[in-house]
């Protein structure tokens, strides 16, 4: 990618980054905390995901359908499932999907291990910090997804400013973060989440997240390559 890019290419790449950033932001929020009525309504009313990949479009539509017209009882049940799946608040024998990279990539399955230190270093270099009100460590899935959203936002900004090399570096950084971090653990995490949730919104969410990250790797590889 050269510094002097055709206007149409800049516009297409900017849309590419902005659209991906919106998806990463939505996914991050889903894993950050329980779904409330306002977020459910916003997600359900969000524009459909435009994709040539039917699995992505259908998966996003399934998430929206799960969140459409939820009453208070349904929201409370979603909160119960959220806490059971991601924080183990339920039977000791139940399947759990702890949303921390270190749990899935460290030899002993412990929190705050090598992956935690690595992402903290990356965040610092990119001048990114998680919300101080969010109590979970930096290798929590919600934070890693938020980091990808921030990189998408920065890449779009660089493109609008005509900074082709900066945009290329940011897109390359996104691809590296996907491969070095998110894609290293999303598959076993999603399997655990599906086994725990069994069905419904959080099972669809885990499946969609895995599918989306893998598709995004392919899309980025085409752009950066």
Image (cartoon, rainbow, N blue to C red):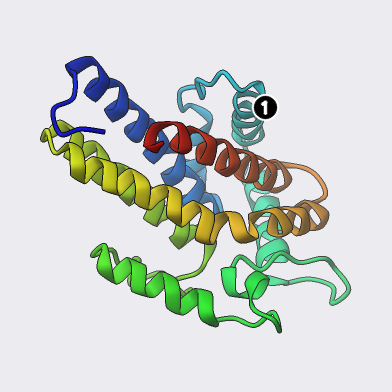
- Give the quarter of the image for residue 94: bottom right
159, above or below 173, in the image: above
Name which residue lies at 53% across and 36% down: 218
Q: Residues within 10 Å of mark 1 (few under 14, many from 20)?
A: some
Quadrant of the drawing holding the N terminus: top left
23 to 136, vertically: above or below: above
- Regarding residue 214, the answer to whether it shows in the image is yes
Please identify the residue farthest to the left as the structure is shown.
Answer: 161
Disc count in the image?
1
Judge by depth and name the residue closer to the eye, 117 or 21.
117
From the viewer's perspective, tell me whether residue 134 is left or right of residue 69: left
Residue 33 in view: no
Task: Give x and y (percent) for residue 217.
Answer: 52, 41
Q: Is residue 206 left or right of residue 154?
A: right
76 or 221: nearer the viewer: 221
* Residue at the top extreme of this rendering: 8
Q: Which residue is mark 1?
A: 55
Q: What is the secondary structure assignment of the residue under circle 1?
A: helix
Q: Position of residue 156 (x, y in %)?
A: 24, 37
Is 131 situated left or right of 49 in this image?
A: left
Give how far across and how far down residue 76 sits, in percent. 65, 53
Residue at the (30%, 21%) spot, across then down: 12
Question: Which residue: 41% across, 36% down?
Answer: 225
Name which quarter of the figure residue 125 lies in: bottom left
Question: Height in image: 221 above or below 10?
Answer: below
Q: Position of residue 188 (x, y in %)?
A: 73, 59
């Amino acid at each position: 990618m050269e510094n002097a890019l055709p206007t149409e290419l800049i516009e297409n790449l900017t849309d590419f980054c902005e659209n991906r950033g919106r998806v990463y932001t939505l996914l991050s929020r889903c894993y950050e905390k329980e779904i409330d009525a306002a977020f459910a309504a916003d997600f359900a009313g969000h524009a459909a995901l435009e994709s040539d990949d039917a699995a992505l479009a259908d998966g996003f539509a399934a998430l929206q359908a799960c969140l459409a017209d939820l009453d208070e009882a349904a929201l409370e049940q979603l909160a119960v499932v959220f806490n059971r799946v991601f924080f183990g608040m339920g039977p000791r024998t139940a399947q759990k999907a702890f949303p921390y990279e270190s749990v899935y990539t460290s030899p002993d399955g412990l929190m705050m291990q090598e992956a935690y230190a690595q992402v903290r270093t990356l965040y610092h270099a990119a001048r990114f910090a998680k919300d101080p009100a969010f109590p979970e460590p930096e290798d929590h899935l919600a934070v890693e997804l938020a980091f990808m959203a921030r990189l998408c936002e920065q890449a779009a900004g660089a493109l609008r400013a005509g900074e082709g090399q900066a945009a290329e570096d940011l897109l390359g950084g996104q691809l590296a973060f996907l491969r070095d971090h998110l894609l290293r653990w999303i598959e076993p995490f999603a399997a655990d989440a599906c086994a725990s949730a069994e069905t419904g919104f959080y099972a669809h969410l885990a499946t969609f997240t895995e599918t989306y990250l893998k598709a995004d790797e392919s899309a980025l590889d085409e752009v950066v390559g």
